[in-house]
Image (cartoon, rainbow, N blue to C red):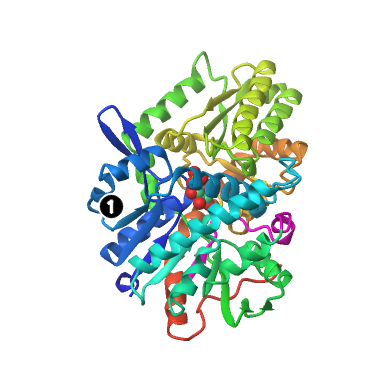
Amino acid sequence: MVEDMKVALVSNRGPVSFVQTSDGFDKKRGAGGLAGALDPVARRLGENAIWISAATSEADRKALVAGEAEGLSDLLGYPVHMLDIEPETYGRYYDVVSNRMLWFANHCLWDELDIREFGQHELDAWDEAYEPVNERFAHAAADYADPDSLVLFQDYHLATAPRYLRGLHPDQTIFHFTHSSFCGPEGLERLPRPLPRRVIEGMLGADLVGFHVPDWANGFLDCCERIGAKVDRSAASVQHLGRRSWVRAYPIPIDAAELQERARDQVAESWRERFLADQTEGGPSKRHVIVRADRTEPSKNIIRGFEAFGTVLDRRPDLAATTRFIACLYPSRQSMPEYRRYSEAIERVVGEVQARHPGSIELFMHDDYDRTLAALRIYDVLLVNPIMDGMNLVSKEGPVVNEVGGVLVLSRGAGSFDELGGHAVEISDALDVDATGEALERALDMDPAEKARRAAALRATAAARRPADWIDPQLEDLSEIQAGREPVTEPPHGP
Ligand code: G6P
């Protein structure tokens, strides 16, 4: 029984972020797919779980010192342990290595962001911050998890922690899951030596290495081969330094029922009414709505999405008269220059399209989950055009809350393309602005019967699997491995 298993979840960002207010601290749910996916898992396991994460901001650190973290387990229903990492070290581990070097490697963003080389600054950040922080997470896992607990390290921030924990507790059952894409040698080998090897050997400290989809798992296996590990492709297992690790894909689903309920609550409802009123104000003019909802993140390819929209309006006066674009974005990782520049560039391209087509784009640049859900309820077209994306939960969330038979426009780089691509309008090359414009146009012009058929198929597919279908196989596979057997989940199919 999964509920009886003892599990330590270990991730950089935890379930809650603190926000300082004039009279104390508010709590916000942790940003991004990872925190949202793990919270229901931890709730289900209750006292059998512990979640180890870092204080990720100044407000988090102050809240820790003020003892605010102690009340978290009552609020959440499971224990949380937050690591207080010295801010300068944290910045080098998070900004310089995790979100710059490793995120860009996993999404192969080197040419997109014109990043040519790394120097001593980055190598020092690896040695003096990334490795020590990973070692600290491993020590915390060793201290807080029982010897028979399953330890689940999450994401690229903690690529080398499995190997450190293996050194401390050789018999612990260890998992590493990557929530982003994993591009493979083309992305990883642009990092200076010895980092590509360190990343792979760090992850291979785990007994089981998980990804959302087979493409990312195969990218990892390619990297294993490049460091000379013995890879058995048919079993998807890797033999290295006297140990064996298994590699599996576990595609993450959404909680459709919970989402549908939240999307209908009062706050979301008033946003929906406001969007619909805007639509009909002064006559039934802007009746077609394109929506996107993303962190301001280069891999999401937001700028090309607006450029493509602009090209459609330029050549189709009929659509220019009837279509508007609601973009629910929220700034992310603003301590990094690449992300600040990206946010500025978004504002710039929106300004350019608006100058040609006034009133065509409504841009929101801060997080409001209810507003996003309301926009998802009313889209005629949902644009999801990442260059590369681990899964992309919005492409699943949209179809289950949408109420008007909206069309999904989806690029091949989204992990969800495997599951949803057959019912979406495909963008085969996310870097191609004209092709993206044509896909938007096809979606806007689609006949109602075809739209309805596709929307129903998308909704059924996105709602078919439940959160338990993601975590339970992981835990079952780990239990098998703990008992000296092979994982039950089938190996991911080849490229
Ligand atoms: C992605 C990553 C997560 C991360 C989230 C938000 O989903 O896979 O690990 O937490 O983005 O990014 P942030 O840098 O704000 O934690």
Reply above or below: 222 against 156.
below
Observer-nearest residue: 161 or 449?
161
In the image, what residue occupies the spot 72% across and 35% down? 437
Residue 200, position as x, y percentages in the image: 62, 66
Q: Categorize mark 1 by other alpha carbons within 10 Å: few (<14), some (14-19), many (20+).
A: some
- Write down the region rendered in magenta: 175-192
In the shown orientation, is residue 117 left or right of residue 363?
right
Observer-nearest residue: 122 or 474?
122
Residue 164, position as x, y percentages in the image: 50, 68
Reply above or below: 20 against 249.
above
Could you tell me which secondary element the residue under label 1 belongs to?
helix
In the image, what residue occupies the spot 35% across and 67% down? 143
- Residue projecting furthest to the top: 282
**Residue 20's quadrant in the figure?**
top left
Indicate yes or no: mark 1 CB to ligand 1 under 8 Å. no
In the shown orientation, is residue 84 left or right of residue 284?
left
In the image, what residue occupies the spot 63% across and 16% down? 358
Dominant SS type (magenta): loop
Question: Split into 4 quadrants, where in the image is the C terminus?
Answer: bottom right
Q: Is residue 98 in view from this perspective?
A: yes
Reply above or below: 368 against 49.
above
Residue 180 is inside the magenta segment: yes
How many numbered discs sit on the rendered protein? 1
- Residue projecting furthest to the bottom: 484
Q: Is residue 425 in view from this perspective?
A: no
Residue 339, position as x, y percentages in the image: 60, 36
